Image: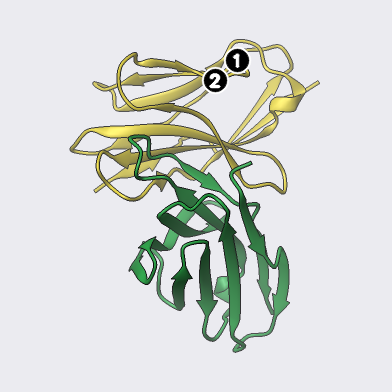
């Protein structure tokens, strides 16, 4: 157990509404990531953070924003949800201050946009 | 640019038979390689990793993978599968010094009793 929780675990929302997903870690690691998982695409990086208030875009960042005001929390926001954002969202952490750079994943949030 | 190819989207295999899940990557620099496993309705768990040294790496539950630099491959093998190995397996690559992992599209392993 890598000490990562995600909330909510399931959410159904309507097109055009804002949605915020939360990732919380207890490991005090610098790097945190948001991925989406879709059939046939594997996992694709949305945004990542390398410290408080330090974030950068990933492969599929359009339509998403992130914030990190505390080391332990990384928020993903869909400003105006669309059906194409129906997906399973995973948060991950990486202890990049060590030589080993593997990532550890949370349990996921299943988001359905109707 | 990095990319990861898992050619087989689904692999059915009978219990106690051997299995190989294929992974090829493209990168112009040194890489770290990983296999993750995802059981139904769960997150991804690290199965094994290659960072440096011996090209053959093993997991605690009998899987092994071999890094082949000339063929840019990191295939996952198990000599005898169990029902509990039914899951989706993802290969991932990270260039040394990079922040991110790039994932393949996954291989769904189904073990048939």
Q: Is residue A81 above or below residue B9?
A: below
Q: CA distance from mark 1 to mark 2?
A: 6 Å
Say which chain tag 2 marks: B
Residue B98: give x, y in percent of width and height: 27, 47
Residue A31: give x, y in percent of width and height: 40, 54
Residue B15 lies left or right of residue A83; in this view the side is right
Residue A69: give x, y in percent of width and height: 45, 73
Which disc is residue B59 wearing?
2
What element does badge 1 sit on? loop
Say which chain tag 1 marks: B
Image colour assigned to chain A: green
In which quarter of the view is residue B18 placed? top right
In which quarter of the view is residue B15 placed? top right
Image colour assigned to chain B: yellow
> Looking at the figure, which quarter contains the C terminus of chain A?
bottom right
What residue does disc 1 label?
A: B62
Q: Is residue A16 above or below residue B82?
A: below
How many residues crowd around disc 1 within 10 Å: few (fewer than 14), some, or many (20 or more)? few
Is residue A41 visible in the rendered image? The answer is no
């Amino acid at each position: 157990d890598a000490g990562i929780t995600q909330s909510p675990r399931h959410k159904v929302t309507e097109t055009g509404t804002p949605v915020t997903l939360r990732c919380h870690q207890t490991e005090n690691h610098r790097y945190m990531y948001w991925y989406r998982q879709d059939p046939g695409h594997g996992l694709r990086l949305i945004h990542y953070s390398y410290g408080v208030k330090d974030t950068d875009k990933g492969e599929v960042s359009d339509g998403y924003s992130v914030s990190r005001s505390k080391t332990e929390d990384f928020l993903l926001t869909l400003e105006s949800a669309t059906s194409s954002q129906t997906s399973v969202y995973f948060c991950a952490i990486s202890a990049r201050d060590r030589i080993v750079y593997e990532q550890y994943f949370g349990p996921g949030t299943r988001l359905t946009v109707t | 640019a990095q990319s990861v190819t898992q050619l087989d989207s689904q692999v059915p295999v009978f219990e106690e038979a051997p299995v190989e899940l294929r992974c090829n990557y493209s990168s112009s620099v040194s890489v770290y390689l990983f296999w993750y496993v995802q059981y139904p309705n769960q997150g991804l768990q690290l199965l094994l990793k290659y960072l440096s040294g011996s090209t053959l790496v093993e997991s605690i539950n009998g899987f092994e993978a071999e890094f082949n630099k000339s063929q840019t491959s990191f295939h996952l093998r198990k000599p005898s599968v169990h029902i509990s190995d039914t899951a989706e397996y993802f290969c991932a690559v990270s260039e040394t010094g990079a922040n991110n992992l790039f994932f393949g599209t996954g291989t769904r392993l189904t073990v048939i009793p």
